[in-house]
Image (cartoon, rainbow, N blue to C red):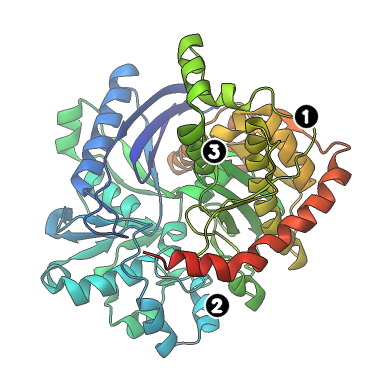
Amino acid sequence: MVLLGIDVGTSGCKGVAFREDGALLGVAQREYPFMTPQSGWLEIDPEKIWEAVSLVVQEIAIRLERRIDVIAVTSHGETLVPLGEGSKPLCSAIANFDTRAQGYVDFWRAKIDPFELFQITGMPLHGMYTVNKILWLREHLPEVFEKAWKFSCVEDFVIARLTQDEPVIDYSLASRTMMFDVQKKEWSDKILNLAGMEKERLPRLAPSGEVVGVLSSSLQREWGLPEIPVATGGHDQPCGVLGCGVRKRGEAMYGIGTSECVALNLGSSPSLTREMMENSFCCYPHVVEGNYITLAYIASGGSVLRWFRDQFGYEETLRAKQEGRDVYDVLLEDLPEYPTSLFVLPHFAGSGTPYLDEGSRGAMLGLTLGTRKKEVVRAILESLTYEMKLNLDLFERFGIPVKALRVIGGGSRSRQWLQIKADILEKPLMTLATGEAVALGTAMLAGKARGVFSTLDEAVEAMVRVEEEFVPSHLISVYAPRYAIYREIYKRIRELNLEISKLV
């Protein structure tokens, strides 16, 4: 049985085909460009997204001699795709990190207590959510707003194109719109009434891992494929959690890439407390039925290391090219073995949780004339981990256990960085046999929808393999006083950073 997971990100689409025993059968990917018509605006051409999906499916179909038994779709959240009749996009998609709708935070504050909003939607009030982009559309592009048949996100747009039927969105991605009642698992009448929105203009809701249509007859002819069931996947983060084999409360996925994110399984009890809201932690349905997840993230993450590579890593880049190696392998080799006394505030793109402070900026403290390049590299790795520890400590303070972390992403290839993280976080970290956890989780949902697995637990047992475990070492005691210093940095320079952010 061939299970195809389609992962639609903000800058590209990846399709990964798996056998039901977890064996990877084929990978295809295509990129598409961002558009930035104004400062703070981030748009994607929906037709470019569909073109990428189409090419990815066709490439895998050719590679596997047209053997695809079921397709499921996962995507990033919050992006708005206004659709006319026939699922034709009416304008560019307003992407997740677009900031144009930030002003609608005040709109909501005037209409509803933010804590009540959080208890309904599981989302701390913020301008990035899809509903605010719809409000912006109504005010600034009324002709598009009026023509819109459905206000879609990306998973449901792709499903509509695959089936040539109505858009269908799963519960996890619907949560990222800030219009979904995360406990009742339905569009919230109260939120829609306050927004002046009609429920009929939103996609149909369905659980993750449910068949919602079949590949359209025209695509069957065009791609040379049979009638294939198409299923809901979910928001990419919870799909990744599933693909890591996380099933129990207190287990988490740790994505180490351009940004860093810990997605924690809360089990069957949603955590909708004031403390969670005040620290910007969301709470919404997992793709595993009856479970909820929360997220902690660093907005910059590995992009800080990329910035250092681009600005100061000329020698390492040249050497990597000459030796046919990955530049990060060269950059991260021969690091100091002992923890540094340098600190890097990694807010190069503002902060992530728990502050969500767009005015915060990066900083480096502890430099001396004797500081060496490799010390700075290690300090970046350490400080990114200190930043995540702030979040995990809060979870535990709120009574949410964090027992173990399963790591994915480019950073998971560095054994030294994983050991640093285990020592600072004081948690075991486990790597996986496949780096395609998001697509794997989506393929598991496809398998459940197709009847290959009766439960997702069965899918995890069949398809997920842990490869290596990193446990905390004796350096825990060395990092403890350094972490105590790091905890003070943001608070002590926050006002200065705010003034700096206002400079033209």
In the image shown, does 395 or 411 lie closer to the viewer? Answer: 411
Image quarter where the C terminus lies is bottom left
Query: Image check: 194 left or right of 287?
Result: left
Query: Image check: 97 left or right of 444?
Result: left
Which residue position holds label 3?
305
First along the sequence among labels 1 and 2: 2
Residue occupying image coordinates x 13% and y 59%:
85
In the image shown, does 302 or 339 lie closer to the viewer? Answer: 339
Nearer mark to the viewer, of 2 and 3: 3
- SS at mark 2? helix
Which amino acid type is shown beneath numbered disc 3? Leu
Which amino acid type is shown beneath numbered disc 2? Gln
**Can the viewer see residue 247?**
no
Instruction: Point out residue 14 in the picture as x, y percentages from the top left corner.
Output: 37, 34
Instruction: Point out residue 152 in the picture as x, y percentages from the top left corner.
Output: 28, 60
Which amino acid type is shown beneath numbered disc 1? Glu
Nearer mark to the viewer, of 1 and 2: 1
In the image shown, does 320 or 284 lie closer to the viewer? Answer: 320
Above or below, comparing residue 258 to residue 117 in the picture: above
- SS at mark 3? helix
* Number of marks in picture: 3
Q: Which mark is residue 337?
A: 1
